[in-house]
Image: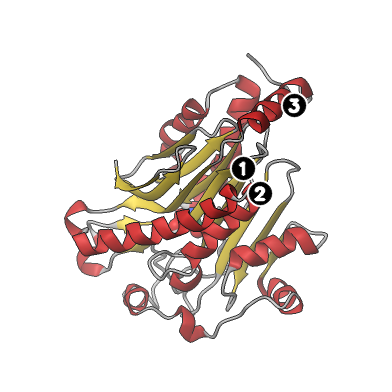
Amino acid sequence: MRHGPKDLGFYFHRTLNARIMGNTALAIHGGAGTIAKELMTPLREKDHRAALELALQRGHAVLTKGGPALDAVETAVRALEDSPLFNAGKGSVFNADGQHEMDASLMNGSDLRAGAVAGVQNVKNPIGLARRVMDQSDHVFLSGNGAFEFAHKQKIELEDDEYFFDAFRYEQWKEVVGTDEVRLDHAGSSMEAKEKKFGTVGAVALDRAGHLAAATSTGGMTNKKWQRIGDSPIIGAGTYANDMTCAVSCTGHGESFIRAVAAFDVHAMMLYKGAALIEAVRVVIHEKLPPLDGDGGLIAIDRHGNIVMDFNCSGMYRGQVGPDGEFRTAIFR
Ligand code: ASP
């Protein structure tokens, strides 16, 4: 069955169904990659799962109170940004200058409003700044100094460089500083061969009113230079939400996800081909990204609250809570 963009009958019918059901669902990720099982100590696993669960709880609380999906994804991503375990907000990797440049975006599925920031420094929660861009400016995407000026004007919470300092990330950076090497958020030289992961965070949600939203936040890649920007803040590449189909947040090799227009492609296959969410995600992750060296994964949710979390590498930090209210977290397949 085909659904054209002007097929409003389809749109309103689905919206009404979701309203009657009132189901809510939320999924989150903390990055995908080659996560070596033998390096995942019980303590490390426990810490990661606890951080994921906290983010799920915060986002879920918004949804159970009848709050919008947009607030739920922002809230969940904030919690992940506040954890040093993931490459976003507090845990962001170092760039070539030994600084932290962060990217974030979010999108509202009911009206296609979106907000994004790239290359921002000292902003405690870049996802909150992306939300302000959406709500308080006439723009969708701000970057660098301009975004910082806007943050200042909006009285966004800022933090000193020390807040973002993490000894583990610093060691990662010291191995490559002064070289042209741009690295993923991997586990350090001794573990390098075994573990290469992307610590970007993201969330997708369906609220009681049947609306969808997606959010993604990242520190990008270790030792990045020239103000490199990945897929995470790019609407359609790392983040996309549309009530007609789905909400998507990606993690992986940003350059490949940009070229694949990965998040939008999941939506497009559902809209134009009538593909089910699970099939659209499978095609993007396992057929379209691999020829582009697109290691990584994505989380997605459709209008019925179906959640798909798929990846083409060994693991993805992830969690979900569906209509049954049960919290589930996972790392490997
Ligand atoms: N996609 C992010 C980027 O390329 C990295 C990640 O997912 O961790 O900036």
Residue at the spot of label 3: 12
Colour treatment of the image: secondary structure
In the displayed structure, 81 sits above or below 27; it is: below
- Mark 1 or mark 3, which has the lower sequence index? 3
Q: How far apart are marks 1 and 3 (CA)?
A: 16 Å
Residue at the spot of label 2: 68
Mark 2 Cα-neighbour bin, 10 Å: few <14, some 14–19, many ≥20: many
In the displayed structure, 305 sits above or below 78; it is: above
| The residue positioned farthest toward the front in the image shown | 65
SS at circle 3: helix
Mark 1 in CB contact with mark 2 (< 8 angstroms)? yes
Q: How far apart are marks 1 and 2 (CA)?
A: 6 Å
- Quarter of the image for residue 193 reads bottom left
* Dot label at residue 207: 1
SS at circle 1: loop
SS at circle 2: loop
Q: Which amino acid does label 2 sit on?
A: Pro
